[in-house]
Amino acid sequence: MNIIKPEGKIWFLASCIELYKDEKKISGKEAYNLLHKAGAVNFIISCWEGLHTTSSEYIIDSIDEYIRNNS
């Protein structure tokens, strides 16, 4: 059985916040607050297994689509 450590999810979330802030040219705090408010933090954590194998562009697009559909 493959056990996923919580640290992997947190590391991936932090990476996504970094990607998102760089793409949107905002601070890390602004990016986290935006993602948290839209519920995208939970989306990223719940989908991390699939998302972490994709490109940066796909991750950003997925986050943007989630925010559009859930705001």
Image (cartoon, helix red, strand yellow):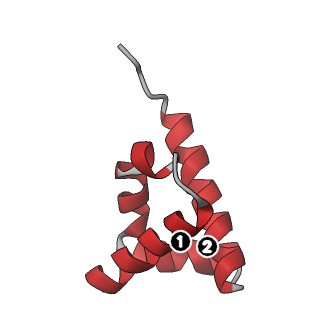
Tell me the amino acid under the disc marked 1. Ile
Task: Tell me which residue sits at (51%, 64%) in the image.
Answer: 59
Residue 6 numbered tag: none
Task: Tell me which residue sits at (62%, 56%) in the image.
Answer: 14
Residue at which label 2 appears: 20
Task: Tell me which residue sits at (42%, 69%) in the image.
Answer: 62
The secondary structure type at the circle numbered 2 is helix
Task: Tell me which residue sits at (35%, 70%) in the image.
Answer: 39
The secondary structure type at the circle numbered 1 is helix
In this rendering, the answer to whether 52 lies above or below 44 is: above
Q: Mark 1 and 2 residues: CB-CB less than 8 Å, in contact?
A: yes
| Image side of residue 68 versus residue 33, left or right | left
Asked whether 44 or 49 is in front, the reply is 49
Query: Which image quarter: residue 56?
Result: bottom right
In this rendering, the answer to whether 34 lies above or below 62 is: below
Q: Residues within 10 Å of mark 2 (few under 14, many from 20)?
A: many
| Image side of residue 2 versus residue 54, left or right | left
- Identify the mark nearer the N-term, 1 or 2: 2
Query: Which image quarter: residue 24?
Result: bottom right
Query: Which image quarter: residue 68?
Result: bottom left
Q: In which quarter of the image is the N terminus?
A: top left
Residue at which label 1 appears: 60
Distance from the alpha carbon under mark 1 to that under mark 2: 6 Å
Q: Position of residue 49 (x, y in %)?
A: 42, 42
Tell me the amino acid under the disc marked 2. Tyr
Q: Quadrant of the C terminus?
A: bottom left
